Amino acid sequence: VETSIDLFQWDGMSCWNIDVTENAHKWFQKHKKKNRALCERVIRRLTLLSTGRWPYVLCKRLKSKSTSCSLYETKVDGASRIIWEVALSFSPRRSSTDQSYCEQVIRVWDIVLDHDNLSRAIEQVIERIEKSHLRGQECALYSEIDTSKSEMIHLEDNVGKLKIPRVFPMRQQVISCTESGTSNPSGKAQHFHPASDDPRQFTLLKFYELNAGAVKMLLDGQDDNTDLPFTPGPKEHEIIHFQSKPQRSILLMGRSGTGKTTCLVFRMWAQYASYLDDSKGPQPNQLFVTKNDVLRREVQRSFKNMGMAWRRRSEEVKNN
């Protein structure tokens, strides 16, 4: 069954979304040239996980000290394991300007490859994940979601149990703990985004959604410095897709490193991609102006990477 899986047939075919961390992304960059067969097998295993059918070989529960995360491992071969989590993540595809939603996803934290001491390597990854969750809980920002019906759905079919991800409405804005207090409204729960496990850094982690375009970039990308477009958060999503009526300029303010330029690039690409998908109306005229030449090149590279992911995704959809 595994060998018959089309590596690039993702969009519209998967029950679960697959998010990968920067560590998993770097693993593909490191191994795609010297061991492409292993990389393809990892993608095929993730494809099987995305269907919602999880036999023990794909879904072995891992012990964790943290009660806020459900960790699993998937065996790739004798020396390789995929370490992943059933996590809650903001869902741009389900959200609108009126209501934000989060959904359960498969979050791939790392691919462990160790011929000498596989167990110890897995333990180190678990420790890093636990630190990321703990540091996220120290953040002053969180989302409010309704987890009163948070159990995973199990549907019986001819193959066995099919696990369906749950979807929950969430607050449109990420709120400050200092404003909301410590008490939770009835039926509401606090959801903290994982943060960097490095004590010297004070940033939330970015995750990248796998789709046909992203998989093709992971396996066939010639440039090792190519970045995958990450999944924006609820506030970023609101800014990216905000439409003022009547149309007017937008003033976006924030400290350095808070994501202003990132939102701008995503907003530019969202408008351009909408034109490419529909081919209706005039092509948007866009101009990015800055006095910093390094920033100009970074914005150009990010916009180009989004275009590469879109083109490769479109090519696979047309071929299928």
Image (cartoon, rainbow, N blue to C red):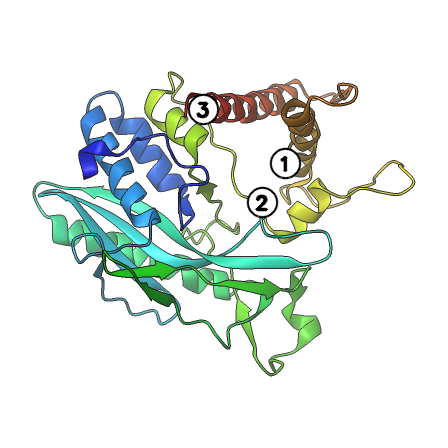
Camera-nearest residue between 173 and 17: 17
Does the CB distance between marks 3 and 1 fall below 8 Å? no
Q: Is disc 2 surrounded by few (<14), some (14 to 19) or many (20+) residues within 10 Å?
A: many
Q: Quadrant of residue 210?
A: top left
Q: Amino acid at mark 3?
A: Thr
Q: Is residue 183 above or below residue 216?
A: below
Q: Amino acid at mark 1?
A: Thr
Q: Which residue is mark 2?
A: 232
Q: Position of residue 246 (x, y in %)?
A: 92, 40
Q: Earlier in the sequence, mark 3 or mark 1?
A: 3
Does the CB distance between marks 2 and 1 fall below 8 Å? yes
Q: Is residue 142 above or below residue 2?
A: below
Q: Quadrant of residue 43?
A: top left
The local secondary structure at tag 3 comes to loop
Which mark, by number, is residue 53? none
The local secondary structure at tag 2 comes to loop
Residue at (18% x, 49% y) in the render: 121
Whether residue 85 appears in this view of the structure is yes
Q: Earlier in the sequence, mark 2 or mark 3?
A: 3
Q: Position of residue 184 (x, y in %)?
A: 60, 80
Q: Position of residue 90 (x, y in %)?
A: 55, 54
Q: CA distance from mark 2 to mark 1?
A: 9 Å
Q: Is disc 1 surrounded by few (<14), some (14 to 19) or many (20+) residues within 10 Å?
A: some
Q: Which residue is mark 1?
A: 262
Q: Earlier in the sequence, mark 2 or mark 1?
A: 2
Of the two numbered discs 2 and 3 in the rendering, the one whose residue sits closer to the viewer: 2
Camera-nearest residue between 231 and 216: 216
Q: Amino acid at mark 2?
A: Pro
Q: Which residue is mark 3?
A: 226
Q: Is disc 3 surrounded by few (<14), some (14 to 19) or many (20+) residues within 10 Å?
A: some
Q: Quadrant of the C terminus?
A: top left
The local secondary structure at tag 1 comes to helix
